[in-house]
């Protein structure tokens, strides 16, 4: 590809990403109302100044551009906001998306900036993020990076498929190149011997596929024997999700990590468990979701340091009970606006409500009206809440990590690829033996043979790597699977110990339940200030507001 082709492609993508904002009135020096400021701003002296009506707008795309704007939130964050109906707390998103509280807060701030979100402040100073029903479209229109990401998501599967297929093509090409060179060399050798003996076969190219005794055993000798392969075998009787060319890539490098989203699963399950337990849990209750280093022992003190990752990610604090036991309190996880979000559902269309119901596994069969669908969603959530409260202390569940598979290709495909890899390596070694023979000493090879001899080190390295890489990967997978099996076994043992119970465990669980609290719902009537309205519209006393929160900060 020419350099100017690349430059044209890059410039085109840049113009598309920027949305041609270099021609905007702002970039041409034409002033317009500023919209990038929050409603209340603290002046240098500490007091609050009045602002016009605005939202948490991103800076002008003409000024920011694709290279300076923040990265858009990942899909799991967007889905969490979708499921909650657009009105969420940091804890709601962390619980639904399976991320830490800090990560949820960071991504919500970015989303509020890019998707025109609002902030609400409750009477207790708690923050609620509010997004419109079409926040995804708003994000797409305002974020150049999101548009590029969406385009890449469409192209990436095609490119990745081409990369995977190229490994299969490369293997077949290597075999064809190697054995073509072997055939040419063997044919040339026989022609030279016949000429020296005064024998002529009438001219032309002689193609011989039988056993060779001058060069030693030939890899083509296997074709000298006929095989009685079954007739009429239909390969579609046992179809595979992978084509043969894709199976070559799978054989070499595998098919990815089956536990790629394990951390999200872990913290999503933990956050939901902690909420169901009233925000207070014991080490035994969360051990099935973490990585305890040893088996549980009722008669010995257990090192509970394995709980630290949960405390760090989900904002927990250890507390010592009157009996000397340790329980873990997660106050920040108990704040929620999603459960009190009926007004958010009302704003959704019938199609959006149907999508929300399906994402939560709620059946919408026979429901065609918006009001009926709202009632179904509310009833389903209330049922789940009651069921969660009735589960009690013996929820002995744990997370399983999935073992690695060597390849998702069928056994027949793996056998075929392995055989081709062996044939390729054997052919490369045999070709090297031919190149090193006395017959070729002092001869200059041209054409195909010259090309093959020039790249022979690469062909040999490729053949060795094609055998060595899967072999090394297989050994590593075996070691990794043994570690996974051990972790799964320990989690299962802790879950069993929780179900079995014991005197010390009963005491700890009782203390934890005494300290538990329900989820604190932040409703519409609890909101004291919102960035969705001006100060005048809300009738907010800024001096009282300032004094209230300054005194709160001093305390």
Image (cartoon, rainbow, N blue to C red):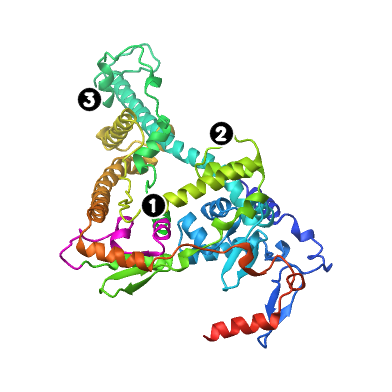
Confirm whether residue 69 shows in the render. Answer: no
Kindly report which numbered mark, 2 or 1, lies closer to the viewer in this rendering: 1
Q: In the displayed structure, does residue 107 sit left or right of residue 9?
A: left
Query: Cα distance, mark 2 to mark 1?
Result: 28 Å
Numbered disc total: 3
Residue 390: numbered disc = 1
Region in magenta: 272-301
Query: Cα distance, mark 1 to mark 3?
Result: 84 Å
Confirm whether residue 91 shows in the render. Answer: yes
Q: Which one is nearer the viewer's eye here, 437 or 21?
A: 21
User: Which label's residue is closer to the chain start, 1 or 3?
Assistant: 3
- Report the residue marked by disc 2: 365
Query: Cα distance, mark 2 to mark 3?
Result: 77 Å
Measured as percent of width and height from the top left, residue 177 is found at 39, 32
Measured as percent of width and height from the top left, residue 309 is found at 36, 65
In what quadrant of the picture does the N terminus appear? top right
- Report the residue marked by disc 3: 214
Mark 3 lies on a secondary structure that is loop
User: Which label's residue is closer to the chain start, 2 or 3?
Assistant: 3
User: Which label's residue is closer to the chain start, 2 or 1?
Assistant: 2
Q: Which one is nearer the viewer's eye here, 80 or 504?
A: 504
- Badges 1 and 3: C-beta atoms under 8 Å apart? no
Kindly report which numbered mark, 2 or 3, lies closer to the viewer in this rendering: 2
Mark 2 lies on a secondary structure that is loop
């Amino acid at each position: 590809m020419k350099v100017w082709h690349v430059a044209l492609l890059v410039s085109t993508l840049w113009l598309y990403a920027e949305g041609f904002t270099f021609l905007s009135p702002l970039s041409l020096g034409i002033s317009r109302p500023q919209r990038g400021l929050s409603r209340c701003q603290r002046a240098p002296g500490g007091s609050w100044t009045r602002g016009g009506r605005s939202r948490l707008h991103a800076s002008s795309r003409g000024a920011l551009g694709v290279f300076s704007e923040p990265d858009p939130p990942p899909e799991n964050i967007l889905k969490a906001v979708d499921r909650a109906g657009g009105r969420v707390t940091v804890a709601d998103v962390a619980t639904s998306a399976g991320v830490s509280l800090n990560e949820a807060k960071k991504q919500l701030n970015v989303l509020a900036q890019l998707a025109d979100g609002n902030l609400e402040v409750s009477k207790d100073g708690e923050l609620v993020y509010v997004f419109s029903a079409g926040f995804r479209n708003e994000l797409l229109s305002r974020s150049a990076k999101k548009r590029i990401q969406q385009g890449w998501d469409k192209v990436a599967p095609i490119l990745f498929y081409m990369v995977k297929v190229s490994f299969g093509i490369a293997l077949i090409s290597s075999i064809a190149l190697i054995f073509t060179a072997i055939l040419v060399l063997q044919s040339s050798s026989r022609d030279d011997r016949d000429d020296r003996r005064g024998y002529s076969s009438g001219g032309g190219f002689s193609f011989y596929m039988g056993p060779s005794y001058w060069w030693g055993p030939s890899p083509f000798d296997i074709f000298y024997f006929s095989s009685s392969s079954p007739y009429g075998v239909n390969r579609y009787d046992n179809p595979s999700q992978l084509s043969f060319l894709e199976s070559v890539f799978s054989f070499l490098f595998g098919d990815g990590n089956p536990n790629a989203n394990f951390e999200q699963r872990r913290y999503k399950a933990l956050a939901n468990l902690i909420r169901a337990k009233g925000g207070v849990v014991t080490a035994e209750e969360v051990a099935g979701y973490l990585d305890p280093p040893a088996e549980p022992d009722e008669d010995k003190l257990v090192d509970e340091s394995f709980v630290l990752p949960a405390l760090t990610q989900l904002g927990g604090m250890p507390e010592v009970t009157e009996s000397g036991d340790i329980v873990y309190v997660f106050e920040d996880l108990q704040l929620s606006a999603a459960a009190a979000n009926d007004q958010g559902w009302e704003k959704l269309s019938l199609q959006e409500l149907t999508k929300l119901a399906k994402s939560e596994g709620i059946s919408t069969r026979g429901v065609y009206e918006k009001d009926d669908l709202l009632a179904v969603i509310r009833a389903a959530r209330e049922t789940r809440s009651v069921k969660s409260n009735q589960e009690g202390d013996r929820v002995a569940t744990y997370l399983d990590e999935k073992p690695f598979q060597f390849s998702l290709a069928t056994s027949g495909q793996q056998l075929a690829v392995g055989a081709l890899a062996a044939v390729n390596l054997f052919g490369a070694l045999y070709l090297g033996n031919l190149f090193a023979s006395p017959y070729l000493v002092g001869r200059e090879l041209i054409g195909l043979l010259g090309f093959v001899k020039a790249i022979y080190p690469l062909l040999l390295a490729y053949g060795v790597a094609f055998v060595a890489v899967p072999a090394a990967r297989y050994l590593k997978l075996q070691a990794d699977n043994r570690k996974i099996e051990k972790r799964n076994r320990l989690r299962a043992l802790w879950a069993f110990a929780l179900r079995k119970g014991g005197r010390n465990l009963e005491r700890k669980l009782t203390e934890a339940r005494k300290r538990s609290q329900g989820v604190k719902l932040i409703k519409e009537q609890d909101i004291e200030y919102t960035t969705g309205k001006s100060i005048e519209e809300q009738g907010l006393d800024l001096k009282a507001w300032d004094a209230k929160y300054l005194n709160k900060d001093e305390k």
